[in-house]
Image (cartoon, grey):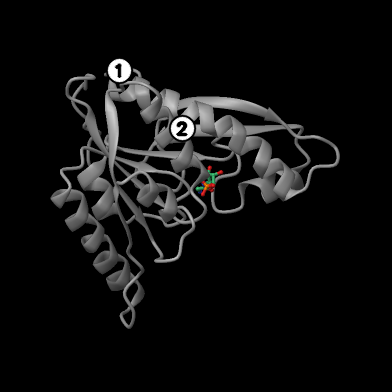
Amino acid sequence: MEAPFVLPRAASIEEPLRLAVLISGGGSGLSSLLSFQSSKPRCHRTVLVIADSENAGGLEHGRGAGITTMGIPLPKGRQSTQRRLAHESMILRQLKSSGVELVVLSGYMRILTPSFVAIWKGRLLNIHPSLLPDFPGAHAHRDALAAGVQTTGCTVHLVDEGVDSGPILAQREVPILPDDDEESLQDRVKKVEHTLYPEIIDLFCSGGVSLEVLG
Ligand code: GAR
């Protein structure tokens, strides 16, 4: 049986929700969230940044903001499932020691195991650069261009045991232009992500999303 979604407490400016942001790359989404959080009092604050590599460029955004920030690479030398579980158990230890209440995936390019998802289900958000259920997976822009669609976008959703398949909280459309390549499309989608994700995180943390909405 799959684990239920259990949402975080409704937070307030006085008692903000403690967020961890997980990244893999340059962390432009992390940077936009940190700017959003520092621009005025919010009901959430980022207390931990973790990347799945020690040299992810985005780690600098966390360090620059004085947040506990670390790269945790996949441990070497074990069978694949064991490695993933060992990796996640290192991450889980950090989430616990920082008192994290909500995990925000922001360009985190690993599929989390069902055991990790079960612990955080309802308190685990992701942003994906397409209008899900279209173009899930690691190559959303390439797949959208190959399909010849004229509109793509981004989706904020709760993570479940599948790949980019959890309940959708918000989507925003982005046009595909005739001369687009993967890079130009990615840049246009990221601009929209950088306003959508902080807004939806804000709504979610303030209790603005109910279990009924999730169906
Ligand atoms: C973002 O566009 C995000 O939607 C995407 O990675 C990019 C990260 O950019 N995520 C995925 O593709 C997850 N499957 P960033 O490192 O500059 O924030």
- Classify mark 1 as within 8 Å of ligand 1 or not, answering yes or no: no
Q: Is residue 2 left or right of residue 145?
A: left
User: Hey, which quadrant is residue 158 in on the image?
Assistant: top left
**Quarter placement of the N terminus:** top left
Q: Nearer the viewer, residue 186 or 38?
A: 38
Where residue 60 sits: x, y (%)? 43, 53
In the rendered image of this protein, does residue 65 appear above or below residue 69? above
Q: Which residue is mark 1?
A: 212
Q: Hey, what amino acid is under mark 1?
A: Glu
Q: Secondary structure at mark 1?
A: loop
Q: Is residue 25 left or right of residue 161?
A: right
Q: Which mark is residue 103?
A: none
Q: Which residue is mark 2?
A: 156
Where residue 19 sits: x, y (%)? 28, 38
Residue found 20% across the figure and 55% down from its top: 94
Q: Is residue 137 left or right of residue 206?
A: right
- Classify mark 2 as within 8 Å of ligand 1 or not, answering yes or no: no
For marks 1 and 2, give the CA distance: 17 Å
Q: Earlier in the sequence, mark 1 or mark 2?
A: 2
Where residue 57 sits: x, y (%)? 49, 57
Residue found 22% across the figure and 19% down from its top: 12
**Quarter placement of the C terminus:** top left
Residue found 26% across the figure and 52% down from its top: 116
Q: Hey, what amino acid is under mark 2?
A: Val
